[in-house]
Amino acid sequence: MSTQQRKERERAQRHDLIINTARKLAESEGWDAVTTRRLADEIEYSQPVLYSHFAGKDAIVGAVALEGFTELAVRLRAVTRTGEPRAVLEGLARTYMAFAEENPALYDAMFTMAVDLPFGQDDTPQPLRDGFQALLSGVARFAGGRDPEVLTEVVWSALHGLIVLSRGGRLPASGREARLTLLLDQLDATR
């Protein structure tokens, strides 16, 4: 291995270490605890080294979000491979909601924090496209005469709303199953 290859490998490993450390810190202590100074201390590199990889915290949050979209897409695609349409739709909804519950700080990076990731545009990163496509593949079967992409956006919005309102204590936990069933029944009834 050449010196250049070794340096590139080490740089990639440092890049991943920064992202993974930021994610772990955010999940355990919240995003307010993730500062460049704290990350530099945690990874045992100087702040200038950290800045050689990322312009600042926002760029780190964006990188964490991209990693999350990749993980979410993999989980959603696994659900769409088998089953009848209603089972696939229910599996997508439950998988999406479980992902948000298991990774609250990651979900925040992906969907509630200000990140410089373009959604629904020509330059949308592939991991975001993959996640949307996985949802679309399950929801499109329920579109009937409606635009499948718009219907997918509405289903995604409904799931996101249920997650955020539940996490914020605005919806009682006791009604979770009833709300999800109602949403799925509404889609199934119009098929």
Image (tube, rainbow, N blue to C red):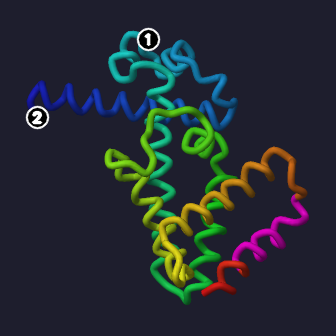
Identity of the amino acid at label 1? Gln
Q: Nearer the viewer, residue 49 or 148?
A: 148
Report the mark closest to the observer, 2 or 1. 1
Q: Work out whether 183 lies above or below 63.
A: below
Q: Residue furthest bottom?
A: 84
Residue drawn 65% across and 85% down?
Answer: 190
Q: Which residue is mark 1?
A: 47
Circle 1 Cα neighbour tier, 10 Å, few/some/many (<14 / 14–19 / ≥20): some
Looking at the image, how many numbered discs can be counted on the residues? 2
Q: Secondary structure at mark 2?
A: loop
Q: Secondary structure at mark 1?
A: helix
Q: Position of residue 45 (x, y in %)?
A: 42, 15
Q: Quadrant of the C terminus?
A: bottom right
Q: Which residue is mark 2?
A: 1
The CA distance from mark 2 to mark 1 is 28 Å
Q: Work out whether 179 lies above or below 30.
A: below
**Residues shaded magenta:** 173-184
Residue drawn 86% across and 55% down?
Answer: 171
Q: Work out whether 169 lies above or below 41.
A: below
Q: Position of residue 12 (x, y in %)?
A: 30, 33
Determine whether, in the image, residue 191 is placed left or right of residue 7: right
Considering the whole magenta stretch, tell me its main secondary structure: helix
Circle 2 Cα neighbour tier, 10 Å, few/some/many (<14 / 14–19 / ≥20): few
Identity of the amino acid at label 2? Met
